Image: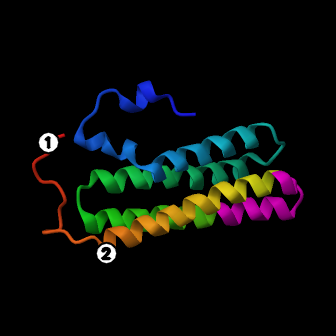
Amino acid sequence: MHDEEFINRNKNINRSFRKLEVWRLAIELFRYEFELLSDIKIDLKLKSQILDSSFSVHSNIAEGHSRRSKKELVRFIEIALSSLAENYSQMYAIFTTGIIDKDIFDRYDDKCFELENKLIKFIKSLINKSMSDEDWRTDYNY
């Protein structure tokens, strides 16, 4: 679903987060929720809060990756994971009120669960990965 032309153009070290599967999955989750909520009658403030938490997930992945520090990346992935938990809670709440039906929530839950598990695995791999120093790249060569 990604437009590879846009994802792959104008490459540099700061945009290398676009290669991350977790970033792409977070974009897909946001797109799913955006399209879903545009077709449903829902309070504007509630819709905004749900989309804000979903938007925060991919934003924090990108920001953390662009910091070029393993420690900061882990922290921003943790923030992304927290935003995803917030988003899940919001989506579950609207499911319990009947704003969305079970099939829609189940599709959302599957996408959210996949992303959660990949973020957790990503954090674990970053922590366990042996690196010679804190920064994984200091030369800014792509």
Amino acid at dot 1: Asn
Relative side of 142 to 84, left or right: left
Q: Which residues are magenta?
A: 87-103
Residue at point 42% right, 24% down?
Answer: 5
Compare residues 129 and 104 and report the one nearer the observer: 129
Relative side of 108 to 52, left or right: right
Residue 29, how many percent across, how many down? 61, 48
Question: Disc 2 on helix, strand or loop?
Answer: helix
Q: Can residue 69 be seen from the camera position used here?
A: yes
**What main secondary structure does the magenta stretch of the protein show?**
helix
Is residue 70 shown above or below 107? below
Compare residues 110 and 51 and report the one nearer the observer: 110
Residue 11, how many percent across, how many down? 28, 33
The residue that mark 2 highlights is 128
Q: Quadrant of the C terminus?
A: top left
The residue that mark 1 highlights is 141
